[in-house]
Amino acid sequence: QVQLVESGGGLVQAGGSLRLSCATSGASEHTFMSSAMGWFRQFPGKEREFVGGISRSGVLYYVDSVKGRFTISRDNAKNMVWLQMNSLKPEDTAVYFCAVSKRPLGGSRWFGDYEDWGQGTQVTVSS
């Protein structure tokens, strides 16, 4: 069974940066390479919302609110995915999750199309 572990969250001032990591285990390198990955965030009392994703071929897609500020990358040899967050705003404060897309080609922004969720990592941006 695939397990995901997010890390790298914390408290940062507005305008600052954080780099979130998503480590995967329980999957072969081939399986990871064949999977699209996504990042989501969840605000208190809200459903998880899509932040961005990366297809198995490296195609990137983001929600408009983070375009130009956030960057997703992956290293298939290390079974790792990262979310680089720059120019952070207080409204980015949330718990951030990574997940595996059920769609090999990725592209979905709906949390129901993702599985094997990690436990999340808290990101807090102070004003």
Image (cartoon, grey):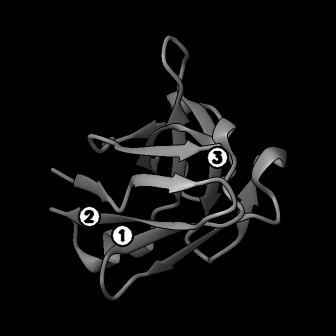
Give the amino acid type for the residue marked by disc 3 in the picture. Val
Question: Badge 1, how many Cα within 10 Å: few under 14, some, many 20+?
Answer: many
Image spot of residue 105 (x, y percent): 62, 59
Give the amino acid type for the residue marked by disc 2 in the picture. Thr
Q: Residue furthest front?
A: 127
Q: Does residue 29 lie above or below 19 as drawn? A: below
Residue 106 in the figure: left or right of residue 6: right
In terms of secondary structure, where does tag 3 sit? Answer: strand
Image spot of residue 71 (x, y percent): 66, 69
Residue 34 in the figure: left or right of residue 70: left
* Occupied quadrant, residue 9: bottom left
Q: Which residue is mark 3?
A: 51
* Occupied quadrant, residue 6: bottom left
Q: Which residue is mark 1?
A: 32
Q: Residue furthest top?
A: 45
Q: Which residue is mark 2?
A: 24
Contact? badges 1 and 3 (CB < 8 Å): no
- Distance from the alpha carbon under mark 2 to that under mark 1: 8 Å
Contact? badges 3 and 2 (CB < 8 Å): no
Decide if residue 102 is in sight here.
Answer: no
Contact? badges 2 and 1 (CB < 8 Å): yes
Mark 2 vs mark 1, foreground winner is 2
Mark 1 vs mark 3, foreground winner is 3
- Distance from the alpha carbon under mark 3 to that under mark 2: 19 Å
Which of the numbered marks, if any, corresponds to residue 100? none
Q: Residue at horizontal 82%, vertical 66%? A: 68
